[in-house]
Image (cartoon, rainbow, N blue to C red):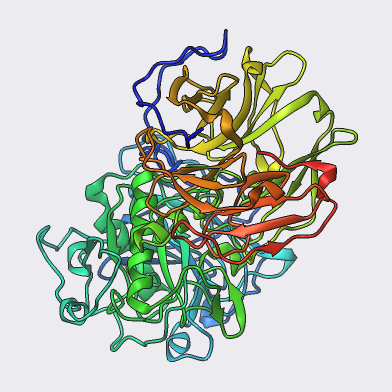
Amino acid sequence: MSVPGPASPSTAAEPPPGAVVPEAEPDGTPLRGAEPVPAGVAPVESVPPPDAPLVRAAPAPADDGLQTVALLPAAAGGVARLRPTSVRTGALAVEPFQAVGVTWAGGADPQAWVRVRADGDTEWSPWYELHGDDEHAPEPGTAEAATATRDGTDPLLVPSSDEVEVTVAASGGSSLPRDLRLDLIDPGADPASPAAESTAETDAESDLDLAAARPTIRSRAQWGADETLRAEPPEFGVVHGAFVHHTVSANAYAAEDVPAMIRSIYSFHVRSRGWNDIGYNFIVDRFGRLWEGRYGGVTRAVVGAHTQGYNDDAFAVSALGTYQDTPPSNALLRATSSLIGWKFDVHGVNPLRAADYDGERWTPIAGHRDAAATACPGDELYSRLSLIRAGTLRAMGIGGDATGGRDLDGASFGDIVARQRLGGSLWLWPGRWSGGFGLRVSIGVGWDVMDVKLLPGDLDGDGRDDLLARRRIDGTMWFYPGIDGGRLGRAVRLGSGWSVFDALAAVGDWNGDGRPDIVARHRNGSLVLYAGNGAGGLLSGRTIGNGWQVMTAIVGPGDWNADGAPDVIARRGDGVLLLYPGTGTGGFGSPRQIGSGWNGMTGITGGADVNGDGVVDLLAWTSGGILYAYPGNGRGGFLPRVQYGGGWNAFDLRS
């Protein structure tokens, strides 16, 4: 029989009896992000110690938008008092402010909490902990570090307020640091014209021949930077990679609030901390707008003050908001990917190679927490770095989703999930950014009752990849939501009648609606698409091909040919391997042969990014249990295969 071609996407098909009842479709989330969050979402609330002694604190007069409050006032005659282990103020009436932070002289690591109230309000805000870390700072030994005489928390951005209360406690029972101070920032009225443009680097970029398109980057003039505050000139380094941060501020800001928010961060970094300029090279807001950060660094490698130890050989983009429990918007993820792709192109960074930071090998796109003891950029944004990496590859025209929906443990790398044939235990081998897999972890028992398992990706839209399994005895399909650390939540029965299919594959977002899908081959050879509904279920099936009974393996590898749409790879009975490129809208392009001799392999499955180069790969194993990775080359072909040991015939690896 000839190679089967795809049928018309509009051809209808009957679903298995009682398979799935379609549900109302929620708003699409093409990058597993979230739509802008509702009003009221703010940084995580925290409770300060109740027994901190009250200190008499008097706000100093505001100085051009900066008002300070000494929290450890000196005794009469200028003699310093003994420093306590904690202090709190009462309610302080102050000039209006939109950012608040605590600073001090000398190295220390106190904890600080604030609450605020606007004029006329009867209710205080909740208490919020002010976060900060010593490694969000200039490089030690540099001229900038010499002028940065004050340590401090990160600034907390708040609605305009004129009352504040603060509690500060030393860590480990030590004394509070000297010269402890509360800093309040009023960014002032927006001095920038909305049409203001920055042309400082237009000429420099005009000579560059780049594959990635330059995204729109709003200038410092557009957020109203007071250029008299920053130091001249900027310092220059190199770019080997990028770090992703978040600013730890409320998420429910309006578009017109953003310039003032950036000015507040700028003022705190320069005037309160003593830095040369705003610490970040770029800022991205929840609407997907990119903003120039530190001066002179749009096309050049300007040294920032964002990730100590890496400021001089990486740039940073900070997401405006708090993304610990709130997912970032799709627009924010797309903008971040386009920025990093373009910036990498400018500086000749290959995202498929490890970044070399003075002999340390790193993934080129990392989170702040990878380099410091911090929660930044928050769990929800950090868990989506794989999407930013995939988007960066697409922006540069060299790749697709490197996890392939197989990131069950949420670490941004594709994993192996396999059922042990003897005993039915389910095991996870976590993927590592440098390639290969970590030590296996048990994630379930009793899985011998299941004859099929699939890793479809994030089927319920909660930002975590999930698992589907078919029960052997009755053909019912079950949904297992992924939860933290690769664990699985309580199973939900999706429907029955799935025993009429003899092959199933997770194919990613086949129809382009932003939700992962699966395909199933009926015993009569028809290939049926079951689209995800975004809520942990599947919509009714429709036939997308016929004659597929000649195939001995059907695999969803992800975006194999790097055209931005997921593909299908199938093995014919004579061992020929065929690529069926997806159109991104639910159909197929023209199939082509990409290999032969594959009938020597017992099984084939999508392996996500096995070798750590950011491109999806295949895994295949022999009857003797030898596992091989066949790395994709990002253009629809293969790199040389790599062996990953023996003994794998004790497991069912199909997923």
Q: Is residue 56 left or right of residue 191?
A: right
Looking at the image, residue 247 sits to the left or right of residue 642; the answer is left
Q: Residue furthest front?
A: 1
User: For this rendering, which residue is in front, 450 or 482?
Assistant: 450
Q: Is residue 409 visible?
A: yes
* x and y, in percent, of residue 367 in the image: 53, 62
Residue furthest top in the image: 17
**Which of these two is toward me, 470 or 390?**
470
Which residue does the image show at 31% across and 61% down from the upper left?
A: 262
Q: Return the x and y of residue 431 as percentages of the image width and height.
A: 67, 55
At 36% across and 81% down in the image, what residue appears?
301
Apparent side of residue 88 relative to residue 93 in the rendered image (left or right):
right
Front residue (pair 134, 171): 134
| Image coordinates for residue 78, horizontal then vertical, percent | 52, 82
User: Which residue extends farthest right?
Assistant: 423
Give the answer, above or below, for where 97 lies relative to 423.
below
Residue 276 % position (x, y): 36, 81
